[in-house]
Image (cartoon, helix red, strand yellow):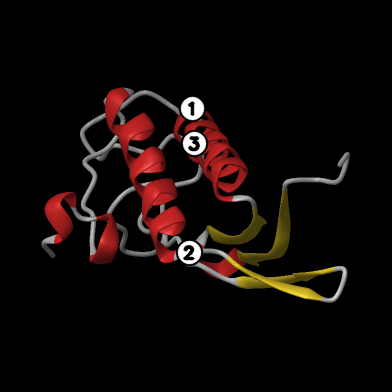
Amino acid sequence: SNTAAAAVVHAYADIPYDRSSFHLAGRSDCVAEVAISLIQNALNEIELKNNNNNDASNKLEARHPFVGLVDHVSVMSITSQESGTTIPTTTAAAASSARQIGSQIDQSNYIKIHYYGLACPNNTP
């Protein structure tokens, strides 16, 4: 089929705190690919002003406490309906997507990855 395999189903911009949220839905491998792209673009495009850095920056200083540029990525299984048939997405597929996202970002040495739930290695929280 030529239908989209992942879509942004909700986007939220929290202007007072300079943060955004995106909810994606679709095939687990495609959702992982889109999430990785969003994360890498954010890490490449957004500079946080370092208090020890005296050179001028055209980026805004963060006005809200943060862990990093990407604080949280949650991957959950959902149930979809196609042609009247209910198609569950397994929790194993969601966990695999979470590990794929974490692995790709970790390999880029951008951020420290912490897994939880079924995405944890050896299923240990």
Residue kind at label 2, given as amino acid type: Thr
Kindly state the secondary structure of the residue where label 1 is placed. helix
Is 22 above or below relative to 37? below
Of the pair 54 and 100, the residue shown nearer to us: 100
Report if residue 73 is visible in the image.
no
In the image, 77 versus 104, the foreground residue is 77
Q: Are the residues tagged 2 and 1 within 8 Å (C-beta)?
A: no
> For the residue marked with disc 3, what is the amino acid?
Ile
Q: Which of pointers 2 and 1 indicates the residue nearer the eye?
A: 2
Left or right: where 103 falls relative to 78: left
Of pointers 3 and 2, the one earlier in the residue sequence: 3
Q: Which residue is mark 3?
A: 46
Identify the residue position indicated by label 2 in the image. Answer: 90
Q: Residue at x 13, y 52 (%)?
A: 122
Q: For numbered disc 2, what is the local secondary structure?
A: loop
- Specify the quadrant of the image occupied by residue 113: top left
Q: CA distance from mark 2 to mark 1?
A: 32 Å
Q: Along the horizontal axis of the image, is 122 left or right of 7?
A: left
Residue bearing the label numbered 1: 44
> Where is residue 22 drawn, in percent x and y?
60, 59
* Quadrant of the rendering where the C terminus is positioned: bottom left
Q: Mark 1: few, some, or many residues within 10 Å (few <14, many ≥20)?
A: few
Residue 99 point in image, percent of width and height: 33, 45
Residue drawn at x 50%, y 67% is 77
Q: Are marks 1 and 3 in contact (CB under 8 Å)?
A: yes
Give, as a three-letter code, the residue at label 1: Asn
Dot 3: few (<14), some (14–19), or many (≥20) neighbours within 10 Å? few
The residue lying toward the viewer, choosing from 52 and 121, is 121
Which is nearer the N-term, disc 2 or disc 1?
1
Instruction: Name the residue located 25 percent from the left edge and 66 percent from the top edge.
Output: 117
